[in-house]
Image (cartoon, rainbow, N blue to C red):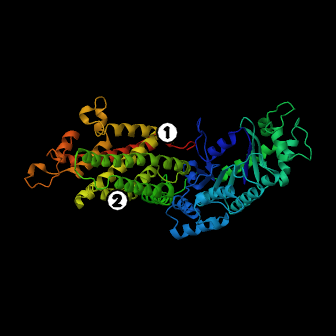
């Protein structure tokens, strides 16, 4: 167990990331990384990295989270049974068995140890990959004494099982640091001030710094860690003595010579090699990655009551309200026809605008989890947006069926025949899916969710205004191009045609096509005013489907290409 101490505010974290093979946010990473002679290209698959931020999928259980990590990172050589046994052992080792079936979002016990449980879970997710080296960013930061001892006891057990532990710490007490075997202490500039054994109650560490000439006076009342930090000018008290170059002092010490000889002897015994069977970037094949990520997203959607079932309930309420408001309106006059057309217009607007905006905060909530998984190289990044695009399909099928089945049946619109009903449902489903993909696309395009929400609101407002209902096509001047690139327009026109079309050219004296009081046919009047055509239904549905696929493809492209969708320190 090695503790990283000292340094500036960011130097420990930067060094830890570099040792794990992660590139710094600013600057570049040079040199060679080897672990027992294994080069960095392959040993990155054998490490675990516990980040300071505990980011986990809120709608997975603790056991499912570990199983997800194990399935993606252990590789195909480990059978399903052995993976499950390994996950159970990790849960037991970290004391998470009582919480194993709880959702992450509900993790809390009677004593309020939520933060400690979350930290244990972050460690467990990495141990599920069975790493040979475990890096940890500030594993005991923010914990009370009991939580600190619990985490350090677990890490000590993991170390005894053969896993190397490298953790960054900020001003630990003597009891906490005594769990570690060695310490690497950095100066303010990031150079080595000490690398060696800690000793019982930090005796070896203390003896080294006390022996340095012109070092501050040490009193027995002072904590050894506080003394070391004060000596390096990193403590709360400022140094009174003249500054010294502790990096050069360490290089000239016997401790450095002993460490250097030990490393040289290790290098002679170890030859640089690569592990067989680890040529691929990811431990699992792409097909398994896709299925696992899709299953995880489906669980997120199914268990997210506020989003999924709130959406379904909202669609049901909209259907009942609109169905009762426009209940069985006939074709008595121009106003009745306008009311039936207005029902379609309002239905499309409500469903479209709500769907485009609702998806933005959900993806924003899940983004930190994706960043952690991306840095761990758990799966190819393209599967993340694809899982969201595919995962939404069954829910929109049900939601649009509720809207059409309840609302249209009450209003008597689009229910003339089974084919009209199914076609109406299909068009509304494709449109709803398309505007949701548009919201997804803007979410991946915008650097922050608030900007995405603002952009979606502006664009959908323009689409609604240029849909050819309030302002007909012949009266649109400057934004006619937006009319032809408008999914609202295509959806409203197709649905209106399905609901009102009647072949008036074949009408005789006993024609059943509805007429207005002046004797003109309803369909002819509406088609002339709105430039509608029954022959264009197939074309409009095709264009709507193409726009749906285009928005999805652009969402995938923006997610992969744009830098703000990639986590720092890759």
Residue 344 relative to residue 29: left or right: left
Point out the image quarter for the C terminus: top right
Badge 1 marks a residue whose secondary structure is helix
| Closer-to-camera residue (255/320) | 320
Asked where in the image residue 14 lies, by quadrant, the reply is top right
Residue 366 relative to residue 137: left or right: left
Badge 2 marks a residue whose secondary structure is helix
The residue pinned by badge 1 equals 563
- Where in the figure is residue 122, as x and y percent of width and height? 62, 56
Residue at horizontal 87%, vertical 32%? 241
Query: Depth-wise, is mark 2 or mark 1 nearer the camera?
Result: 2
The residue pinned by badge 2 equals 406
Q: Residues within 10 Å of mark 2 (few under 14, many from 20)?
A: many
Q: CA distance from mark 2 to mark 1?
A: 44 Å
Residue at horizontal 30%, vertical 29%? 478
- Where in the figure is residue 232, as x and y percent of width and height? 80, 38
Vertical side of 195 occupied by 397: above or below: below
Residue 162 relative to residue 328: left or right: right
| Closer-to-camera residue (157/544) | 544
- Where in the figure is residue 388, as x and y percent of width and height? 44, 52
Q: Residues within 10 Å of mark 1 (few under 14, many from 20)?
A: few
């Amino acid at each position: 167990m090695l503790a990283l101490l000292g340094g500036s505010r960011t130097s420990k974290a930067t060094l830890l990331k570099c040792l794990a093979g992660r590139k710094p946010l600013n600057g570049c990473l040079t040199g060679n990384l080897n672990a027992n002679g294994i080069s960095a290209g392959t040993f990155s698959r054998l490490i675990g990295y516990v980040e300071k931020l505990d980011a986990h999928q809120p709608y997975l259980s603790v056991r499912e989270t570990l199983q997800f990590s194990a399935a993606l990172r252990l590789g195909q050589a480990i059978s399903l049974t052995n993976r499950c046994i390994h996950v159970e052992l990790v849960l037991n080792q970290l004391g998470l068995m009582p919480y194993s079936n709880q959702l992450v979002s509900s993790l809390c016990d009677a004593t309020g140890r939520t933060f400690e449980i979350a930290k244990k879970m972050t460690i467990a997710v990495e141990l599920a990959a069975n790493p040979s080296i475990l890096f940890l960013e500030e594993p005991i930061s923010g914990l009370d004494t009991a939580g600190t001892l619990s985490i350090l006891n677990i890490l000590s057990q993991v170390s005894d099982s053969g896993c190397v532990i490298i953790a960054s710490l900020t001003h630990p007490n003597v009891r906490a640091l005594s769990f570690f075997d060695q310490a690497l202490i950095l100066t303010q500039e990031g150079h080595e001030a000490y690398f060696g054994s800690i000793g019982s109650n930090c005796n070896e560490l203390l003896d080294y710094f006390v022996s340095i000439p012109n070092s501050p006076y040490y009193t027995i009342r002072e904590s050894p860690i506080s003394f070391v930090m004060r000596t390096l000018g990193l403590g709360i008290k400022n140094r009174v003595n003249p500054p010294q170059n502790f990096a050069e002092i360490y290089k000239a010490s016997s401790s450095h010579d002993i460490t250097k000889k030990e490393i040289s002897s290790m290098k002679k015994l170890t030859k640089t090699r690569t592990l067989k069977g680890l040529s691929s970037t990811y431990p699992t094949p792409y097909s398994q990655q896709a299925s696992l990520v899709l299953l995880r997203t489906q669980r997120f959607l199914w268990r997210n009551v506020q989003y999924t079932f709130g959406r379904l309930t909202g669609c049901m309420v909209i259907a009942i309200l609109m169905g009762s408001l426009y209940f069985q309106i006939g074709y008595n006059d121009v106003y009745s026809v306008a009311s039936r057309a207005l029902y379609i217009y309002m239905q499309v607007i409500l469903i479209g605008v709500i769907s485009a905006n609702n998806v933005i905060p959900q993806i924003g909530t899940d983004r930190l989890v994706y960043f952690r998984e991306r840095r761990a190289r758990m799966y190819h990044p393209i599967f993340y947006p694809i899982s969201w695009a595919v995962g939404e399909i069954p829910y929109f099928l049900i939601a649009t069926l509720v809207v059409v089945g309840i609302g249209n049946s009450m209003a008597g619109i689009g229910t003339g025949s089974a084919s009209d009903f199914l076609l109406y449902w299909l068009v509304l489903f494709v449109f709803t899916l398309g505007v949701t993909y548009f919201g997804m696309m803007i979410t991946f395009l915008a650097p922050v969710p608030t900007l995405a929400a603002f952009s979606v609101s502006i664009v959908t407002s323009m689409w609604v205004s240029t849909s050819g209902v309030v302002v007909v096509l012949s009266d649109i001047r400057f934004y006619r191009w937006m009319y032809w690139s408008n999914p609202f327009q295509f959806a409203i026109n197709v649905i209106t045609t399905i609901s009102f079309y009647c072949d008036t050219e074949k009408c005789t004296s006993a024609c059943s096509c509805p007429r207005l009081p002046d004797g003109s046919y309803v369909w002819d009047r509406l088609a002339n005013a709105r430039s509608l055509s029954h022959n264009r239904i197939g074309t409009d549905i095709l264009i709507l489907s193409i726009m749906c696929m285009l928005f999805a493809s652009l969402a995938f492209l923006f997610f992969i290409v744009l830098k703000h969708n990639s986590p720092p320190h890759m």
